[in-house]
Image (tube, rainbow, N blue to C red):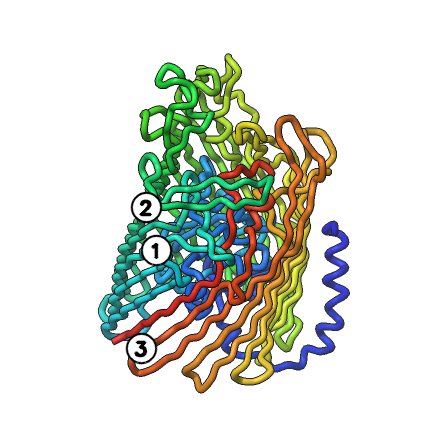
Amino acid sequence: MTFLRLCPLALALVPTAAAIAQQSVDPQLERVVVTATRGTKAIDKIPGAVSVITAQEIETQTLVAEDLSAVLSVLAPSYAPSRQKLTSFGESMRGRTALLLFDGVPQSNPLRNGAREGYFADPSLIERIEIISGASAAQGLGATGGIINFISKTPREPGTRQRVELKYGTQGHSDDALWKAGYTLEHKGGFDALLHVGATLRGLGVDGDGRRLGLEAVQGDTQDSRAGDVFLKLGHDFGAQRLQFSFNKFRLEGDGDWKPVPGNRATGQLTGATPGTPPGIPPRNDVRTVSLDWSHANLAGGHARAQVYKQDFAALYGATAATTFQDTTIAPQGQLMDQSEVVADKAGVKLSWVRPDLVVDGLELTTGLDWLKDTSQQRLALTGRSWVPPLKFTSIAPFAQLEYEFGPVTVRGGARRESANLKVDSYRTLAFYKNTAVQGGERSFSQWVKSLGAVWRLGGGWSTFVSYNEGFGVPDVGLVLRAVNTANQSVDRLISLEPVVTDNREVGLAWRGRLGSFSASAYDSRSNLGSQIRVDAATGVGSVLRVPVRVKGVEFSGELRPLQDWTLSASYARTRGTTAAQPDTPLDVTLGARSQGPDKLVLAAAWQFAHKVNVRVQATRLASRHINTGRVVGTSKLEENFDGYTLADLAVTYRTAFGDFGVGIENLFDRQYVGYYAQSNPAGTNDDYFAGRGRTLTVSWRRSF
């Protein structure tokens, strides 16, 4: 649908909605707010597709699978299926990239996207997840597909409390167990504090046929690994002011007890694993985040907030004798083993001020300034070579937004001015790229990004919205610069570094009441100068192609409470993305698995018995997808084939005086299947033909005292 078609569609739904808007509204729903929009705002006053994943939902889903990407795959309609690996290649949102935040601090690394940013904290820390679907500039660079803000827990009850958590998961085979232990201390009084220490050990599981799952030894795997997290949050209120400090240190690393066994795609033999020690150092993620937040509830009649943060990220990949790493001056061809490491250090400042009832009642001003400094690079750890030189990126972005509420209507419009500078010193590429000397230089670009939208609350819990939002991003700069193989190139002349501006046109309808809630929207997302990665079928080497991208889709999510203790829920997402084979050619190439997930339907039923027992049964259906049949562009094969499947899960929690007990079963019927990305990936090799997890039983115990 075009935007002009979507608007009449929303208006056509209004009379029907108004006619049945007689349901009383649950007052609890009116207090559901989100902070990812740079202010605290009720959901029904935001013109856009916004949702919140609650603490109880996170607890239930992590009982099924201890993985935040799996939580998003089930509860965020347009989020692509989880890879079940440390790498997140293919875990897109609405056919594009989502900006990941942890308490407002950026976790994504757009300059050199190594697809490892999804593991930065223990899931036990997360109190809720706020999701803004579609392009957005509210939180700055990188949200072309949306914003996902993971918000840590905060002490709520006066006094001092402690919590102990134990979790064990197994598939009934040797060396497949998951062990987890966590301790949390909370205090709320003259000051508030939260300390969390947690550790997780994971074995290597099996598929539905009882065979060992394949190990992603290069890009990274959560199997055969150990993880630890230390988190500290301190806060103090000074009248209308609050000062808060938080620190998080997370590390996940492989144990190195298993090594991969190649499969055979031609014969259907899956990638496996066998006991042994893989070469090099096991892959790992090492993330440290520090944040200092200050807020004032009544500064010049408005609410002010300032956040200063520092994030250090390092992702080490497994050792490989990849063609890209070969250099005959170091070792004979084909014998040089190396492993890469992406390092990204970020520092930033976020300032915002929200002033309600400015000049007239109902007029609200939100304004502020963001500053970001990001230095990213990719190096080869075993030989000390530089693969991607240090990318020194700085940006400053003032923004302002006006919102006017009159009766049941809220109109909002804003603009943000992104001014960025990228500096790269002169460097030389690897031998694979002909040891090409590239002259350093700077690229500066400024870009306005705008938003406009309106919400009409129809009464009885019904509302409809229309919105236009732009998001701002950059292509994978590191992937561009590391692949230069033509002489006489300089950084400041590489057109591939032009920014990606994505606009999202959307209409939606929502209802919230005592019997349940639902939201539905249709969107049209466009970028005239997009960024697509094409992979050489022979070498597996990726490169960036700057071509237009257009994604259209519909989303639906809702729940119904027919009885006080029963909740039925459903969500559906249909995504259709297209791009061009080359610049200035038609958009007749369907987006592949690296950018887009399949159509997805999730059905669930939850039963709460006597306020102590909660039972949830859910089923996820991923539709088959066969695209770009016979298409080859240059050295890249674009054809992908995916045979869909349906998986069911079960989670039960039981609250007692001795603690909360939980039982989760992933893949309830022990379905044998090959994951979406593993099936679809057109450049797939015999090393990444992975089956998904078979039936997995997890039991947990948690007690507060």
Disc 1 to disc 2, C-alpha distance = 10 Å
Q: Are marks 1 and 2 in contact (CB under 8 Å)?
A: yes
The C terminus, quarter of image: bottom left
Q: In terms of secondary structure, where does tag 1 sit?
A: loop
Question: Which sits earlier in the primary sequence, circle 1 or circle 3?
Answer: 1
CB within 8 Å, label 3 to label 2: no
Q: Is residue 104 left or right of residue 135?
A: left
Position of residue 289 relative to residue 650, above or below, is above
Front disc: 1 or 3:
1
Q: Indicate the amino acid at tag 1.
A: Asp
Say if 274 sits above or below 700 in the image.
Answer: above
Mark 2: amino acid: Asp
Q: Which mark is drawn over residue 257? A: 2
Residue picked out by circle 1: 175
- Nearer-N-terminus badge (1/2): 1
C-alpha span from label 1 to label 3: 28 Å
For this orientation, the residue located farthest to the top is: 488
In front: mark 3 or mark 2? 2
| 296 is higher (above) or lower (below) than 32 | above
Q: Is residue 531 visible?
A: no
Residue 169 at x, y percent in the picture = 38, 63
Q: Where residue 405 sits in the image (x, y, percent)?
A: 58, 65
Residue positioned 35% across, 38% down in the render: 278
